[in-house]
Image (spheres, rainbow, N blue to C red):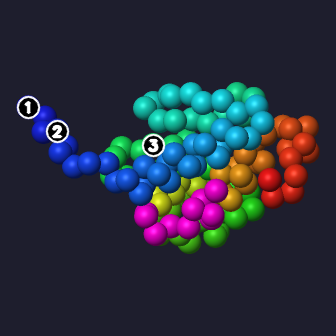
């Protein structure tokens, strides 16, 4: 018999996951799908964030052509598996102490890297 977890979800990480999702869905032409038990946030059908929150761990992967090295320096980060790391994708496992501002900037960079230029051109710089 499989033992069920009796611990409550980490509220801080749940809040970070919720904020990342809301932020990503705020970009133009963004949709959400749920392949492989993860949340996939997409623009025009192309994923720019893969995210998983299991109650006590949050992880998400983003494509980072400009700040990959900075992201890899964060605790708990690594090149994304399945060959995506070689294409600029980074998987992050933020903690309650990780800067939300930094995490949001990484989501935005990934959106801008994946979205078609005509959509990116409608955004204000740093928007």
- What is the magenta range? 95-104
Secondary structure under tag 3 reads strand
Query: In the rendering, at what x and y percent does residue 118 appear?
Result: 91, 37
Residue 88 visible in this rendered orientation of the protein: no
Q: Earlier in the sequence, mark 3 or mark 1?
A: 1
Q: Give me the residue at 12% from left, 39% from top.
A: 3
Q: Is residue 44 magenta?
A: no
In the rendered image, which residue does mark 1 sit on? Answer: 1
Residue 36 sits above or below residue 22 on the image: above
**55 left or right, relative to 36:** left
In the rendered image, which residue does mark 2 sit on? Answer: 4
Q: Give me the residue at 88% from left, 52% from top.
A: 124
Distance between the Cα atoms at labels 2 and 1? 9 Å
In the rendered image, which residue does mark 3 sit on? Answer: 52
Distance between the Cα atoms at labels 3 and 2? 19 Å
Q: State which quadrant residue 79 falls in.
A: bottom right
Q: Dot 3, how many residues are within 10 Å of its Cα: few (below 14), some (14-19), or many (20+)? A: some
Q: Residue furthest left?
A: 1
Task: Please name which of the two marks, 2 or 1, marks the residue nearer to the observer.
Answer: 2
Q: Dot 2, how many residues are within 10 Å of its Cα: few (below 14), some (14-19), or many (20+)? A: few
Q: Dot 1, how many residues are within 10 Å of its Cα: few (below 14), some (14-19), or many (20+)? A: few
């Amino acid at each position: 018999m499989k033992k069920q977890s009796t611990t409550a979800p980490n509220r801080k990480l749940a809040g970070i996951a919720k904020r990342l999702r809301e932020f990503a869905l705020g970009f133009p032409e963004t949709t959400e799908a749920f392949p492989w038990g993860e949340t996939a946030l997409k623009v025009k059908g192309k994923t720019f964030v893969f995210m998983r929150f299991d109650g006590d761990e949050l992880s998400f992967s983003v494509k980072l052509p400009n700040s990959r090295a900075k992201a890899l320096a964060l605790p708990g980060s690594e090149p994304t598996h399945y060959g995506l790391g070689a294409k600029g994708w980074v998987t992050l496992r933020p903690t309650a102490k990780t800067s939300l501002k930094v995490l949001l900037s990484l989501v935005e960079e990934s959106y801008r890297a994946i979205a078609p230029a005509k959509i990116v051109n409608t955004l204000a710089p740093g928007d």
